[in-house]
Amino acid sequence: MNADGSGQTQLTRNNARDGTPAWSPDGQLIAFSSDRSGNWEVYTMRPDGSNVVQLINHPAKDEFPVWSSDGRYLLFCSDRAGHFDIYRMNADGAQVIQLTNGPRDNHYPAWSPDGRWIAFCSNRDSNVEVYIMNADGSGQTRLTHTPGDESWTTWSPDGQFIAFASVRDGTHPKIYVMRPDGSEQTQLTSGPGGDWGPTWSR
């Protein structure tokens, strides 16, 4: 749809479920997840819905594609190791590399604008917290330490902040921001309802 909500156009038409769409940095492709093959896999298509390409063919669940800022790579989450981990592949689906290795779930990956860092969420230390790692999976470091779950990490365009959702108040998720080292954690939304899925303007 247009930025003002007009011109809404359906891009996929099948009996399966399609979700988690993500624009490539150059605007030429949309990566998305679909279970049209019988289980969840990652696909790309043109912005008009044409030229659908299946990037992965694996019996596990593969979903939540995230582009690198240069458009060369995609991150995705997969339970092929028995729990959800974060993987990286070339934009054409080649050279799949596992970046995290359990023993519990790792998800919601978000690539920093300069491509050096990946923020993600994991329940490896009981509840779900925000972590950061190098782009090759090394240097995994915990950023949040709260009694509630965190999710939906996303970087500001200048790489100075990470926005995320948190239920640290024990009721409903709210939107927070923090520095990439975990400092200056600031609550942005309030009220009785739940807030999640933050996205930055360019």
Image (tube, grey):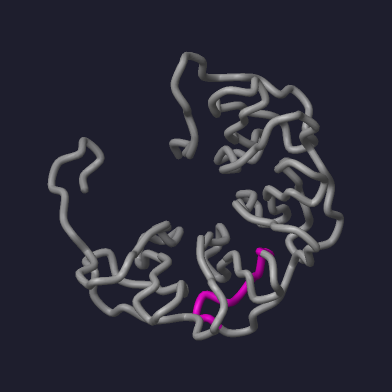
Is residue 154 among what the camera can see? no
Towards the viewer: 115 or 64: 64
Towards the viewer: 138 or 81: 81
Q: Residue at x 37, y 67 (%)?
A: 29
Q: Residue at x 74, y 22 (%)?
A: 184
- Res 19 quadrant in image: bottom left
* Quarter of the C terminus within the rendering: top left
Q: Is residue 93 left or right of residue 185?
A: left
- Res 133 quadrant in image: bottom right
Q: Is residue 85 magenta?
A: yes
Q: Residue at x 47, y 14 (%)?
A: 191
Towards the viewer: 107 or 39: 39
The picture places residue 94, in percent across and down from the top left corner, at 58, 84
Residue range corresponding to the magenta coloring: 84-93
Q: Residue at x 21, y 66 (%)?
A: 48
The picture places residue 116, in percent across and down from the top left corner, at 72, 55
Q: Is residue 17 left or right of residue 2?
A: right
